[in-house]
Image (cartoon, helix red, strand yellow):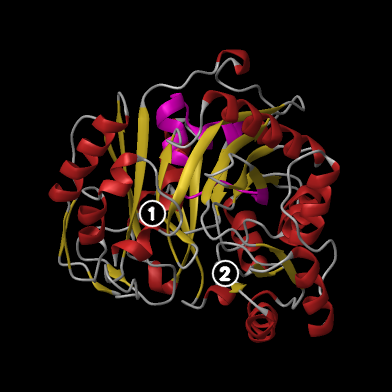
Amino acid sequence: MIESLLVANRGEIARRIIRTARRLGVRAIAVHSEADADLPFVAEADEAVCVGPANPAQSYRNTEAIIAAARSTGAQAIHPGYGFLSENADFARTVEASGLIWVGPGADAISAMGDKINARNLMAAAGVPVAAGTTEPAADLTAAVAGAAEIGYPVMVKAAAGGGGMGMGVAADEAALRTEYDKVRAFAERMFGDGSVLLERYFPRVRHVEVQILGLADGRVLALGERECSVQRRNQKLVEESPSPAVSPELRTRLLAAAVRAGEAVDYRNAGTVECLLDPTTGEFFFLEMNTRLQVEHPVTELVHGIDLVEEQLRVAAGLPPTFDPDALTVHGHAIELRINAEDPKRFLPGPGTISIWVEPTGEGIRVDSGYAEGNTVTPFYDSLMAKLIVHGQDRTEAIARARAAVAAFDLAGPKHNLPFFTDLLENPEFLSGNYDTGIVSRLR
């Protein structure tokens, strides 16, 4: 097993990785910005290094500073968490060129899946269902108009280098396409340094379902069940559950098999997620993208499978077999994750501030992965995620009941927060039925 691990991230995911590292006897090293010096993950690490000011470009995305911190502390490996440098192929190559172990998929797989057009084409060649769309970037507005005419309106306009729900727009006709194309292209150039734009068929009513994959050290790719991620605001997830209430045994077999093919197509190692759109009317699913990292919502998979995905990541990176029998995977019960964000519960606009009260719920089937504690300040420099409230029950009904109780018991004051939204959602007939789609949040507001 790896003996020392530098966590190139912050907040709840850094704390989450550190927890597993310390349980395994692995020396855990944190890096942090000046703004995060007082957060729990820094105190809980065996060693911590400040890598720069609050601006992520000067700290958490500062490759030179992070590599220097690894060298100065004698770290053997680097875990990137999610976000920041986690899907940066150049960073992965730099880590390995520095003689360190990269806890993640190979740089080639990251590169292949990072370009959405290349990824779509690779998946189609591998026999993974792909929605109608462009097979090369729409170089200009004329090409975009021609592509949309071939696909048929409405179309989704997407940044080819985007991710995390950013850099997307919907066009119902050519006039809207002209507006969205320019908007998405400008956003992509500003945020990703790549203005390439692709077009895909847009589904007015769709579910977002994803599959957790794990590429083992021996070359096998496993599918560890699916997650339902359709409760979203601005194309970004708020709630995830596993198993998905929309997936039948027959559909699950097809979905998981497609995810394995996707991983095999890029010789995938370590943890990743194959995201798909599911048409609830026809039962068709289509490849959306592959996230070449650990997902925010990984805890629901952990709870229903009884495994620690971070531990499995470390084992793969060390060339070791998994802790479980790949041929005897079973699902136990139902798990739901709620993302507790520092944002208002109606418009979902950020609301940073100092936490004056922070009392986490406890009890059977309740888990909280948090990045903050009472007295900490949620700053405007980073994502608004404060904690993940995860519940597990014998079935979906029990999991929802535990989620209600946990939300009611979570005492939080200071920053704005979205706990009231979850109170409403967990009583909503559409959500309770399990028959919901990505438009459910707009219908609740």
Reply above or below: 2 against 278: above
- In terms of depth relative to the viewer, which is nearer, 141 or 340? 141
Q: Please, is residue 167 above or below residue 432 in the view?
A: below
Residue 288 is one of the magenta-drawn residues: yes
Image location of residue 136, percent across then percent down = 85, 66
Q: Which mark is residue 166?
A: 2
Q: 286 or 354: nearer the eye?
A: 286
Look at the image and give the residue range highlighted in magenta.
Answer: 287-315
For image coordinates 83% across by 52% down, the residue present is 121
Please tell me in which quadrant of the rendered image residue 1 appears: top right
Residue 56 in percent (x, y) is at 53, 73
Q: Position of residue 430 (x, y in %)?
A: 31, 48
The reply to whether discs 2 and 1 touch (Cβ–Cβ < 8 Å) is: no
Residue drawn at 21 percent across, 48 percent down: 427
Q: Residue at x 75, y 40 (%)?
A: 128
Q: Which residue is mark 1?
A: 41
Where disc 1 sits, the SS reads: helix
Q: Is residue 235 above or below residue 212?
A: below
Separation of marks 2 and 1 at Cα, in angstroms: 27 Å
Does label 2 or label 1 sit earlier along the sequence? 1
